[in-house]
Image (cartoon, rainbow, N blue to C red):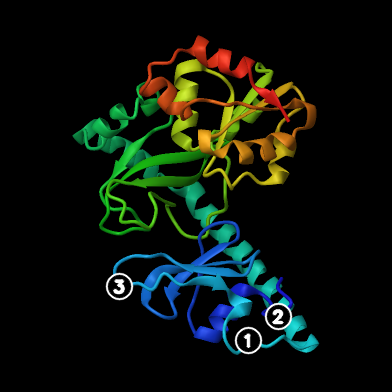
Amino acid sequence: MNDTIGDPVLFVESRFGIKLRKVSRTEYAGPCPWCGGTDRFHVWRDRGNYYCRPNPGHCARAGWLDELDDVKPLTEVERLAARVSALERRAEEHEARLSALEKMHKSSAHLLYHKNLADTGAGADYWLAEGMTSAILRHKLGYCESCPTAPGQASYTIPVMYDGKLWNIRHRLASPNGSGKYRPHMAGLPSMIFNADDLRRKDAHELLILEGEKKSMIVTQETGRANIAVMGMQNFKPEWAAKVGPWFRTVYVAYDPDATEKAAQVAALFGARGRVVDLPVKADDFFVRYGGTAGQFAAHLASARAV
């Protein structure tokens, strides 16, 4: 927490009278205090910086909250009150996540979206163009005419399953409008490992950590190797390393070619087991666009470097 402004989210909401919503582990978004909109203004709770996404008619302001005009250091009483408010808010967010998860566990929306592929063929061309064949049935991929968290926008759907339960449905927007390609099925859901059931595969002694669900599905389809995926290179939580059982003697981190530094940070969490895979292209493109084989992929793993 910043000693000057206290909790950045509470500071913005109290100073500007706006409501922010959580969009990732430490990132919140809402209307820009200067140019409006609905979710253009982003604040990072762990760093205390802000950013308005540039677009015609928007201000693109960026900076640090404690450097705004007229910001004065908090008193000890104000700092304590801010800490208490932050704890209360996190407790509320935890309760909201539990409530959202209960709803997801009871939902069968992913099966309806998957049925769209069989009944109408809607979305099938997209998934086939992405290289999905057996993955379509294995992962119950689907198509949604109107994304619940981006109403009016069609989406291609990826269920996030674990232990036989539905934890989320990732909606890949058919026509992203500049605010990101993916949406969750509902607000308040926690970050999840994709393909987490593979963490139980004691028939495998190697595990891959990939960046993105599509890469996980393609690697499973083309190689059968045990793997998990995170939803973006920044989103591997250090505590997740403890979920990787000791029977995985080698843990390969195969992020995109521009994310090898982040891959090395994740690999380091596994000590002597960790390896960084320097792929020349994205893992799914390796197979789908460039015709790579399972054997060629294995050769890249064999040349992975220790950290």
Residue found 45% across the figure and 20% down from its top: 221
- Badge 1 crowding class, 10 Å Cα cut-off, few under 14, some 14 to 19, many 20 or more, is few
Callout 1 touching callout 3 (CB < 8 Å): no
* Label disc, if present, on residue 71 of the rendered structure: 1
Tell me the residue that label 3 is attached to.
57
Tell me the residue that label 2 is attached to.
4
Q: Is residue 141 above or below residue 56?
A: above
Looking at the picture, which amino acid does disc 1 mark? Val
Cα gap from disc 1 to disc 3, whole angstroms: 27 Å
Residue 304 picture location, percent across and down? 64, 21
Callout 2 touching callout 1 (CB < 8 Å): yes
Residue 242 picture location, percent across and down? 75, 38
Viewer-side residue, 232 vs 225: 232
Q: Can residue 281 be seen in the rendering of this structure? A: yes
Residue 146 picture location, percent across and down? 28, 53
Residue found 28% across the figure and 46% down from its top: 174
Residue 22 relative to residue 139: left or right: right
